[in-house]
């Protein structure tokens, strides 16, 4: 039986459990400390990001890593040290020494996909420090996050860690906050939940000021832990990742740092675990066992393919189709056609051998906006005119949300400005479309961007009515 | 990469072969201590002796060699975002547009040097290096260098694809010019052995482009340029005195 600290699901805390009460008290106490104190609420939040320019940001501030293969490990360390500081504060206030940060597993049916009550109540709440008005009002009102935003399926089903279409994100420099190699976990549910909650959570410079941020990231960390337990999944062994150290502050404001390779076993290395001892079954569209004939001119899929475990780096994919012009997203669904070029497929066929995976990917380039519109757009293939919920679920390939767009466009220091880039594998969904007869024209793929609504709310977000348009440069299909 | 390598090989051949290159075999530049040497002669800067248009081929060769490495990332992006059969053409379009920016700059700079009868002297070099040192520390330099990393969405087919590659190359060239115009101007007034100037200047621009902390690199190169400027101006003052 482990003696490690146990992080528990906030919605299944035992009756009488006071974890959130002590969390609120610690938050309140930390908020009273000066910003220059590394154990203060302000300082801890600013480590992730801050818009404060006066006094000038401290070197330890604005350090979050996004759009990068360092995303999960940096945030794991960040939450780890934060939890230790909070626990120390809890003990100082007379609370339990085994306090651990709860996590919010929002991929559950109502009401567990809604903001926990302790974070919503205000005036007579025993946990007033957990409530902030700077959120989507529907979220504060109890609206639920839909499965299309909260589901970890896209992420947990990825066989590899490294790559923008894989679990953890693509290779980047360890410097700089926002890159364009966003992995599947970072996009969904991480970015999407940030955007759906909105307010402070919708901007990386203010996100960590919201007390729910930490429970959200505890869940993201838990999903990484689950992914690691799946047979065949492996964290990067590349020294550029494993030997990379990130600095934070520990109890008492003492500077501390950890290496990537030193945090891979959360029980042994970091002395904490999660209440769910068994790995969650990976739910997602299953690979077909038999041959799947994609419509001409696509080469035949030869059936279930092996995990790309032997391939440490993504293979070079060939462009086989793209939209012809840029377009904009607003508050209504948008459908665009990706034209597949037969010559590109023929040339890909010539270089694709039976050993390669014959997988297809969708890439969405140059996603730009003046600011985060606060909308999560679901991306779907070949939707009918009036899709049913089942059809939506089966044609869903991923989401587009613009968490971090402000910082990507206007980076600090030496980082270069860029639009956002999202990539996702669509092989399994294409198999599904073929089976149900929704994809018969191999020369075209319809891609729909559909704004996602919160459950029990007819409002997509507070800003939906006046959401700034999102421009997308190109939607492409790649094949390898 | 092959084109850049060939450019360097040709440049080395020109320099070592003693071919009177239009840039550096003629110089009004005297090393300290040469003033009393009988065979010393002060020669006008190449920019006066040679028509500007005839100097452009060598200028282009230098740009390919020195600025080519900074364009590799852009060419790679262009290639990977293009259909396989037009990758070579797309990269060529990008590189041609990129170089066009530098050729236009070269024409303007060479014309200016000719117009103002710039001599390759210690004073001229000192002033240019001083300006380069200052430029390295400006926000405009940093902004241009940052923009060198900016990639754009490229149309996939048709005339839009061709124009897209050209526009991307041109845009990349503008950013690169904003970052390195001063360093390249040193080549116009630099005397003597071309390679002695090309190697450190090219190395500086490449390291700046690839560095994860480019601000440190630019600050360091500003310091080196500043020290070199002071040395050059000190020699100029001593010679005139």
Image: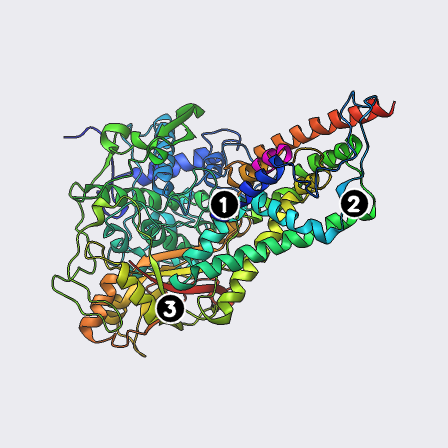
Main SS of the magenta part reads helix
Residue sticking out furthest to the bottom: A385
Q: Which residues are magenta?
A: B195-203
Q: In the rendered view, does B130 fall on the left or right side of A335?
A: right
Task: For the residues labelled 1 and 3, say whether their Cβ atoms are less than 8 Å apart.
Answer: no
Q: Is residue A185 magenta?
A: no
Pointer 2 residue: B49
Q: Residue at x 24, y 59 (%)?
A: A358
Q: Is residue B201 magenta?
A: yes
Pointer 3 residue: A450
Q: Nearer the viewer, residue B123 or A248?
A: B123
Q: Element type at marker 3?
A: strand
Badge 2 crowding class, 10 Å Cα cut-off, few under 14, some 14 to 19, many 20 or more, is few
Label 1 or label 3, whichever lies nearer to me, is 3
Numbered disc total: 3
Real-space Cα separation, disc 2 to disc 3, in angstroms? 67 Å
Label 2 or label 3, whichever lies nearer to me, is 2
Badge 3 crowding class, 10 Å Cα cut-off, few under 14, some 14 to 19, many 20 or more, is many
Pointer 1 residue: A205
Q: Element type at marker 1?
A: loop
Residue B190, located in which quarter of the rendered image?
A: top right
């Amino acid at each position: 039986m482990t003696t490690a600290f146990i992080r528990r699901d906030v919605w299944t805390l035992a009756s009488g459990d006071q974890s959130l009460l002590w969390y609120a008290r610690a938050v309140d106490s930390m908020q009273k400390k000066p910003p220059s104190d590394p154990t203060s609420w302000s300082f801890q939040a600013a480590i992730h990001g801050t818009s404060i320019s006066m006094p000038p940001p401290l070197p330890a501030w604005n350090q979050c890593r996004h759009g990068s293969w360092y995303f999960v490990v940096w945030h794991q360390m960040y939450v780890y040290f934060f939890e230790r500081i909070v626990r120390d504060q809890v003990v100082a206030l007379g609370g339990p020494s085994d306090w651990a940060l709860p996590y919010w597993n929002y991929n559950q049916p109502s009401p567990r996909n809604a903001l926990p009550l302790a974070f919503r109540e205000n005036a007579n709440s025993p946990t007033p420090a957990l409530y902030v008005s700077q959120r989507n009002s529907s979220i504060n009102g109890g609206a639920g996050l839909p499965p299309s935003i909260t589901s970890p399926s896209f992420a947990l089903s990825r066989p590899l860690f490294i790559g923008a279409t894989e679990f953890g994100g693509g290779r980047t420099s360890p410097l700089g906050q926002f890159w364009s190699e966003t992995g599947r976990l970072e996009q969904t549910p991480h970015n999407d939940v940030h955007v759906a909650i909105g307010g402070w959570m919708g901007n990386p410079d203010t996100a960590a000021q919201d007390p729910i941020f930490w429970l959200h990231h505890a869940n993201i960390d838990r999903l990484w832990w689950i992914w690691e337990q799946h047979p065949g999944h492996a964290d990067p062994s590349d020294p550029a990742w494993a030997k990379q150290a990130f600095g934070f502050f520990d109890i008492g404001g003492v500077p501390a740092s950890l290496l990537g390779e030193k945090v891979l076993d959360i029980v042994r290395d970091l002395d904490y675990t999660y209440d769910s001892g068994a790995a969650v079954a990976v739910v997602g569209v299953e690979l077909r066992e038999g041959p799947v004939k994609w419509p001409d001119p696509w080469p035949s899929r030869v059936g279930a393919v092996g995990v790309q475990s032997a391939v440490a780096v993504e293979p070079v994919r060939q462009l086989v189709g793209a939209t012809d012009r840029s377009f904009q997203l607003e508050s209504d669904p948008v459908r665009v056609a990706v034209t597949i070029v037969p010559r590109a497929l023929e040339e890909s066929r010539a270089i694709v051998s039976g050993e390669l995976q014959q997988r297809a990917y969708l890439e969405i380039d140059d996603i730009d906006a003046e600011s985060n519109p606060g909308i999560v757009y679901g991306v779907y293939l070949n939707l009918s005119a009036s899709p049913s919920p089942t059809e939506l679920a089966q044609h869903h390939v991923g989401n587009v949300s613009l968490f971090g767009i402000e910082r990507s466009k206007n980076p600090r220091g030496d980082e270069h400005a860029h639009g956002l880039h999202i990539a996702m594998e669509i092989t399994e969904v294409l198999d599904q479309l073929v089976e149900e007869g929704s994809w018969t024209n191999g020369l075209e793929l319809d891609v729909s961007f559909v704004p996602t609504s919160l459950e029990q709310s007819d409002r997509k977000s507070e800003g939906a009515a006046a959401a700034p348009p999102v421009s997308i440069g190109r939607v492409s299909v790649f094949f390898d | 990469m092959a084109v850049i390598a060939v450019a360097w090989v040709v440049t080395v051949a020109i320099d070592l072969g003693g071919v009177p290159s239009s840039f550096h075999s003629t110089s009004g530049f005297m090393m300290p201590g040469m003033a009393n040497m009988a065979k010393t002669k002060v020669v006008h800067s190449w920019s006066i002796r040679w028509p500007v248009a005839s100097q452009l081929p060598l200028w282009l060769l230098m740009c390919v060699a020195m600025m080519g490495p900074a364009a590799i990332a852009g060419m790679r992006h262009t290639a990977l975002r293009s259909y396989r059969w037009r990758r070579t053409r797309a990269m060529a379009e990008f590189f041609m547009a990129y170089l066009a920016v530098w050729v236009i700059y070269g024409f303007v700079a060479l014309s200016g040097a000719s117009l103002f009868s710039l001599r390759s002297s210690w004073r001229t070099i000192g002033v240019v290096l001083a300006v380069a040192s200052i430029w390295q520390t400006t926000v405009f330099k940093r902004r241009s260098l940052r923009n060198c990393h900016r990639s754009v969405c490229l149309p996939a087919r048709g005339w839009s694809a061709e124009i897209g590659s050209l526009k991307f190359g041109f845009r990349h060239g503008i950013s690169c010019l904003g970052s390195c115009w001063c360093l390249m101007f040193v080549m116009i007034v630099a005397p003597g052995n071309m390679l002695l100037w090309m190697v450190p200047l090219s190395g500086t621009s490449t390291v700046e482009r690839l560095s994860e902390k480019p601000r440190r690199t630019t600050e360091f190169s500003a310091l080196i340029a500043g020290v070199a400027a002071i040395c050059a101006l000190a020699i100029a003052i001593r010679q005139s005195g």
